[in-house]
Structure formats: C-alpha cells, structure tokens
Image (spheres, rainbow, N blue to C red):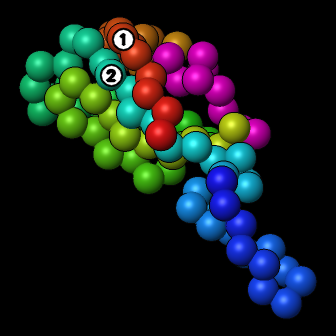
C-alpha cells in the first residue's frame, strides 16, 4: 500500500479507502452453477448479507466486496452452500 503526504495528511494510494475501512474485494469460484436461474439464486442470497457490496454474479463465480468487520469468508461459504452450491475457491484481490 502506498501513501502520499499532503500538508501533513496521509492520502490513500493504490489500495484506496476500502482497505482502510476493512473492506476487501474477492472472487468466489462456485461449482454447480449452470444457468441463469443459478445466478439469480446465488445473487439473491448474497445481496441479503450485511457487509456485502459491489456484487456481480455470473455462471461459476461471484465478484463482491466485503466488510471484514461484518461478515467472514466462512459465513459467505456457508450461505452459498446452503443455497445448494459449492464454493471451490475464494481469490482475494
């Protein structure tokens, strides 16, 4: 992470303000999603989770930003698995 100083104030550099607030972006690789209905199902359960934002779901994966203070990776995995899908991998950006 880089910071630039401006008159005694640190300005957030490359990672941005989301990093400072405990927010991280991730891609969840999800197995079992085969159609648009699956996409809607996963999107519906994830958009109800407090702490999830910037959600985009497509067949096989979900791109999202989470607030670490509100929700954990384990909780997200459990929510997706309760919807009938398997989280194969989570890649943090």
Give the residue number, with chain letter if any, for mark 1.
88
Left/right of residue 60 with respect to residue 72 in the rendered view: left
Residue 16 vs 49, above or below: the answer is below
Instruction: Say which residue appears at 37% left-offset and 40% top-offset.
Output: 63
Characterize the local packing of mark 1: few (<14), some (14-19) or many (20 or more) Cα atoms within 10 angstroms.
Answer: few
> Which residues are the magenta region?
69-77
Toward the left, the furthest residue is: 35
| Residue 82 seen from this side | yes
Per the image, label 1 sits on a secondary structure element best described as strand
Q: Quick one: which residue is furthest to the right in this view?
A: 8
Determine whether 22 is above or below 49 in the image: below
| Image-based side of 15 in relation to 56, left or right | right
Residue 70 part of the magenta segment = yes
Of all residues shown, which one is farthest toward the bottom? 7
* Quarter of the figure with residue 69: top right
Residue 38 percent coordinates (x, y): 20, 25
Q: Is residue 18 visible?
A: no
User: What whole-number distance in Å separates the C-alpha atoms at marks 1 and 2?
Assistant: 5 Å
**Residue visible at 52% across and 13% down?**
78
Q: Secondary structure at mark 2?
A: strand
**Residue at image x 56%, y 61%?**
14
Q: Is residue 67 magenta?
A: no
Left of 8 or right of it: where is 36? Answer: left
Q: Is residue 64 above or below residue 62?
A: below
When asked about the image quadrant of residue 4, the answer is bottom right
Horizontal relation, residue 70 to residue 34: left or right: right
Q: Are marks 1 and 2 in contact (CB under 8 Å)?
A: yes
Label placed on residue 62: none
Q: Which residue is mark 2?
A: 29
Q: Residue at x 66, y 54 (%)?
A: 1
């Amino acid at each position: 992470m880089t910071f630039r100083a401006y008159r005694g104030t640190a300005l957030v550099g490359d990672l941005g303000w989301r990093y400072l607030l405990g927010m991280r972006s991730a891609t969840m690789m999800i197995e079992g999603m085969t159609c648009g209905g699956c996409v809607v199902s996963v999107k519906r359960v994830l958009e109800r989770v407090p702490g999830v934002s910037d959600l985009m779901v497509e067949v096989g994966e979900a791109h999202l930003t989470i607030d670490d203070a509100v929700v954990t990776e384990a909780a997200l995995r459990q929510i997706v698995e309760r919807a009938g899908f398997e989280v194969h991998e989570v890649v943090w950006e």
